[in-house]
Amino acid sequence: MSNDCLFCKIIAGEIPSNKVYSDDDLYAFHDINPAAPTHILIIPKKHLTYVNSADEGDEALMGKLLLKANQIAADQGLSEDGFRYVINTGRNGGQTVFHLHLHILGGRALGWPPG
Ligand code: 5GP
Ligand code: ZN
């Protein structure tokens, strides 16, 4: 838990969120400002600032994050038409909340390349 981290506060229940999934390691919730009809964020409960803050000790956690995202995408009905995962990282990556989060975006055709 990082005291001044928005997503740590969401995990702790200090800031409300629209929960999709929770277990000992992961928390998933709807993005407050959705960029697509389905826009879910999945985060580790352990505070990792960036995706590249993870080290070898986080190998199982990172694998679980991706596999759980796959399950959530399927549960949301995104498997057939497709979807996108995004992990914005650092300033040039457009990261605005500095607690690792995987965006799950779906429900419409998404443009490429990103701006
Ligand atoms: P980033 O730009 O860091 O990859 O994405 C941060 C995401 O967090 C944005 O899509 C933004 O809408 C979302 N977000 C920011 N504050 C909150 C909040 O208080 N609650 C929820 N549910 N999402 C948030
Ligand atoms: Zn945090």
Image: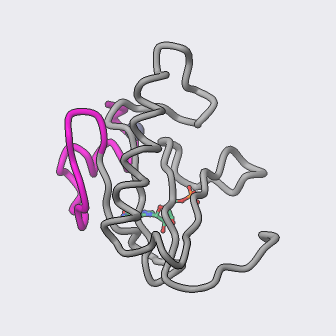
Colour style of the rendered protein structure? one colour
The spot of residue 32 in percent (x, y) is 39, 72
**Of residues 92 and 71, which is closer to you in this image?**
71
**In this view, 105 is above or below 14:** below
**Residue 17 belongs to the span the image colors magenta:** yes
Query: Ligand 2 shows up in which quadrant of the image?
Result: top left
Q: The C terminus is located in which quarter?
A: bottom right
Residue depicted at 32% across the width and 36% down the height: 45
**Of residues 80 and 66, which is closer to you in this image?**
80
Kindly give the residue lying farthest to the front in the view shown: 80
**Of residues 87 and 83, which is closer to you in this image?**
83
Residue depicted at 49% across the width and 22% down the height: 59
Q: Which of the 4 image quadrants contains residue 18?
A: bottom left
Q: Which of the 4 image quadrants contains residue 52?
A: top right
The number of numbered discs placed on residues in the rendered structure image is 0
**Residue 20 belongs to the span the image colors magenta:** yes
Residue depicted at 37% across the width and 75% down the height: 77
The spot of residue 73 in percent (x, y) is 41, 64
The spot of residue 14 in percent (x, y) is 19, 51
**In this view, 77 is above or below 94:** below
**In this view, 76 is above or below 87:** below
Query: In the image, which residues are magenta?
Result: 1-26
The spot of residue 9 in percent (x, y) is 28, 46
